[in-house]
Image (cartoon, rainbow, N blue to C red):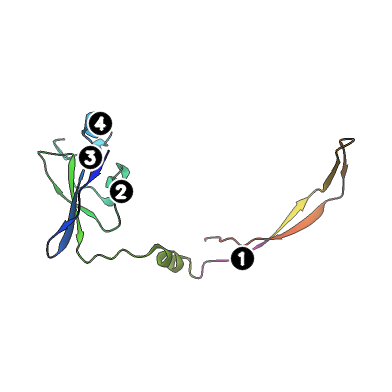
Amino acid sequence: MIHYSDKYSDDMYEYRHVILPKQLFKMKIIPESYWNADQSALRLLSEKEWRNIGITQSLGWEHYEIHAPEPHILLFRRPKDFVPPTQPALRRAKDAGRRKHYKIIVPTDVRILYPSSLSQIILPPVFLVMQYQFTMYH
């Protein structure tokens, strides 16, 4: 289980450390490319890399320091006044002007089942007009 410390801060940054289970290192689950040249400790990891090994934190954290004697402890920081962008606002900005609405016309056969005789009557093809709104990105 990954352990997350409480946050602590100075005048500029908010800090926390993350303790990874030692089994991750013993079982060699962490990719070799995440280690420094002599394989004694992890190198500084990008956000994508530390999320890839199972660390989950809010936005803005940076892996900034390595403590070689204890490679299973990762040190993180972010600016003290960091305000993460809101997801709905980001999504609206991304989607602005990119939506198109389409009407879908689906050809279909209409089948009527009579349970008593289990016979079917197939009527000529009918076009069902269904109005869907969906987003197509281009």
Q: Disc 1 marks which residue?
A: 101
Q: Is residue 99 magenta?
A: yes
Which of the marked residues, 4 or 2, is nearer the chain's N terminus? 4
Q: Position of residue 77 (x, y in %)?
A: 19, 56
The answer to whether residue 73 shows anywhere in this view is yes
Q: Residues within 10 Å of mark 3 (few under 14, many from 20)?
A: some
Amino acid residing under circle 1: His
Q: Nearer the viewer, mark 1 or mark 3?
A: 3
Q: Disc 4 marks which residue?
A: 28
Which of the marked residues, 3 or 4, is nearer the chain's N terminus? 3
Helix, strand or loop at label 1? It is loop
Disc number for residue 20: 3
The answer to whether residue 43 shows anywhere in this view is no
Name the residue at 64% across, 63% down.
Answer: 102
Helix, strand or loop at label 4? It is loop
Q: Position of residue 121 (x, y in %)?
A: 88, 43
Q: Residues within 10 Å of mark 4 (few under 14, many from 20)?
A: few
Amino acid residing under circle 3: Leu
Q: Disc 2 marks which residue?
A: 56
Dominant SS in magenta: loop
Which of the marked residues, 1 or 2, is nearer the chain's N terminus? 2
